[in-house]
Image (cartoon, rainbow, N blue to C red):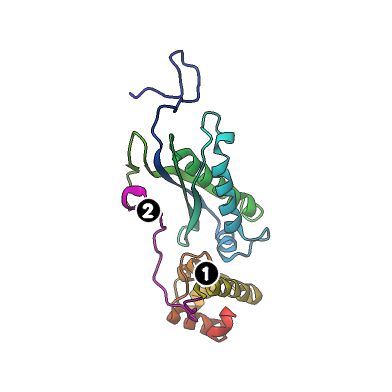
Amino acid sequence: MNKLTHLDENGAARMVDVSDKAATDREAVAEATITLSPEAFEAVTTGTAKKGDVLAAARIAGIMAAKKTSELIPLCHPIALTKANVDFDPDSERNAIRIIASARTTGQTGVEMEALTAASIAALTIYDMIKAVDKTAVIGDIRLVSKSGGKSGAFVAPSSAKPAYRSAGMRSRARPATLMSAVAAPPPTKADANRDTGAQREAFRSFMTSRHLRATQWAKEAGVPAAHIYAFLTGKARAIPADVAEQLARAARTRVEDMFK
């Protein structure tokens, strides 16, 4: 059994001395899952929760938590993070949201706890913002997905499915698994792609709110998977496929262009 590095020879807790360790590029990815009621899931993914944009708040909370990990966990070293990121992967079949948090630094100790803390606090923030709708929401499956750098080298957690975040040598920017390929409707110009996509997403969300459209029911009436709507609203897809947008517009008795302006 490996010796617990946070205990000295007398069994007393200590902060590990990393003075002699080499500074290397280090990255860690962690995940957590929160399972919600259908009503809470709908509110979170469509941006209609009474407290506001739940996922935006959870992302900021997770990033802030990563930066303050050493203040929350007694024996962690203060770390100068070079990157902290939180992403979300909604699962409409389970009414669950998978939270993927990553952290990176160049230093003498790893960032596993920063990634785990970010994922955990993001999940708690989601709960806080929807507890008025769903006090039975369950947070679980908090774990380290992968890490790189340092004396112990790379680690990837065993899983039956490929982790959503993996990169060559764990050095390139981690990316979430793609939910689907999509064709813009209407397509943004190349020069203003990012700005236009964000504007279309907000217009689409406002359209749903003004018409009191619930993603699951609307998709059912249109005969399309609700995942297309969720993926667009949460930024996992840059756009809704043209044929899906046509069916949604038909079900809402409107024109496609009116849903995005």
Instruction: Name the residue tied to disc 1.
Output: 216
Compare residues 249 and 168 and report the one nearer the observer: 168
Instruction: Name the residue tied to disc 2.
Output: 172
Q: Residue furthest top?
A: 10
Q: In the rendering, at what x and y percent does residue 236 appear?
A: 47, 64
Compare residues 40 and 101 and report the one nearer the observer: 101
Distance CA(mark 2)–CA(mark 1): 36 Å
**Residue shown at the point (31%, 52%) measured from the top left:** 168
Q: Amino acid at mark 1?
A: Thr
**Cβ–Cβ under 8 Å for marks 2 and 1:** no
Q: Is 18 on the left-hand or right-hand side of 59?
A: left
Q: Main secondary structure of the magenta part?
A: loop
**Residue shown at the point (55%, 63%) measured from the top left:** 45
Magenta stretch in the rendered image: 164-191
Q: Quadrant of the C terminus?
A: bottom right
**Residue shown at the point (35%, 53%) measured from the top left:** 167
Q: Secondary structure at mark 2?
A: loop
Q: Secondary structure at mark 1?
A: helix
Which corner quadrant of the image does residue 211 belong to? Answer: bottom right
- Residue 107 to residue 258: above or below: above
Q: In the rendering, at what x and y percent does residue 106 appear?
A: 44, 42
Q: Amino acid at mark 2?
A: Ser
Q: Which mark is residue 191?
A: none
